[in-house]
Image (cartoon, rainbow, N blue to C red):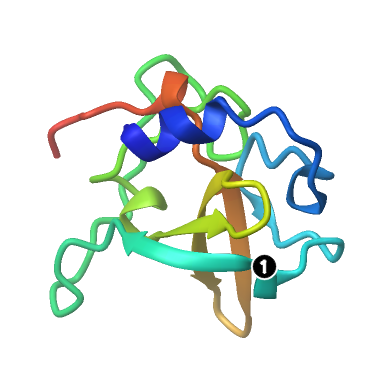
Amino acid sequence: MKLALSSAAVSAKCSCSSVPLLAWQSLPTSLDLAQLAEVGTLVEDPYEEPTFKEYHPKGTRYESEDAPIAPRYYPANLSQVLRCQVCGRHYLRYNEAGGYFTELRMRALRPELLVDAAP
């Protein structure tokens, strides 16, 4: 929550926020990953199979901008926390691994959406 609150307080324009990333989406081509530093992970145990259950008690969906960010639920539970080294905004990033592809997906870390939901 501390990182999300500090991120929400950033008002400076930055290339990292040229695409708002309000919902989970593919890594924007305009985003330079080199300016983002990994500062943490939401993966509890890399040796245990994570849940792929999503948390949507109010009928939101994965792609909803107002979908909760529940760290113990997919996809937040597979995410790394990134910090923009230029402006200080924080993001979640995970690698979506489908049948024949992998794709980095990101979402802004927003304090109003963080939920401490039990599994």
Residue 86 placement, left or right of 37: right
Frontmost residue, 64 versus 113: 113
Where does the N terminus fall, quadrant-wise? Answer: top left
Q: Quadrant of residue 84?
A: bottom right
Residue 81 placement, left or right of 16: left
Residue 109 placement, left or right of 11: left
Frontmost residue, 35 versus 102: 35
Q: Quadrant of residue 19?
A: top right
Q: Is residue 67 above or below residue 96?
A: above
Q: Position of residue 83 (x, y in %)?
A: 52, 55
Q: Position of residue 79 (x, y in %)?
A: 40, 59
Frontmost residue, 96 versus 30: 30
Residue at point 14%, 69% (across, down): 45
Label 1 amino acid?
Answer: Gln
Q: Position of residue 110 (x, y in %)?
A: 50, 30
Q: Which residue is mark 1?
A: 35
Residue at point 38%, 50% (across, down): 76
Crowd band around label 1 with a 10 angstrom C-alpha radius: few (<14), some (14–19), many (20+):
some
**Count of labels in the image:** 1
Secondary structure of the residue carrying tag 1 is helix
Asked whether residue 68 is in view, the answer is: no
Residue at point 54%, 39% (across, down): 62
Residue at point 81%, 38% (across, down): 13
**Residue extending furthest bottom?**
100
**Residue extending furthest top?**
58
Asked whether residue 114 is in view, the answer is: yes
Where does the C terminus fall, quadrant-wise? Answer: top left
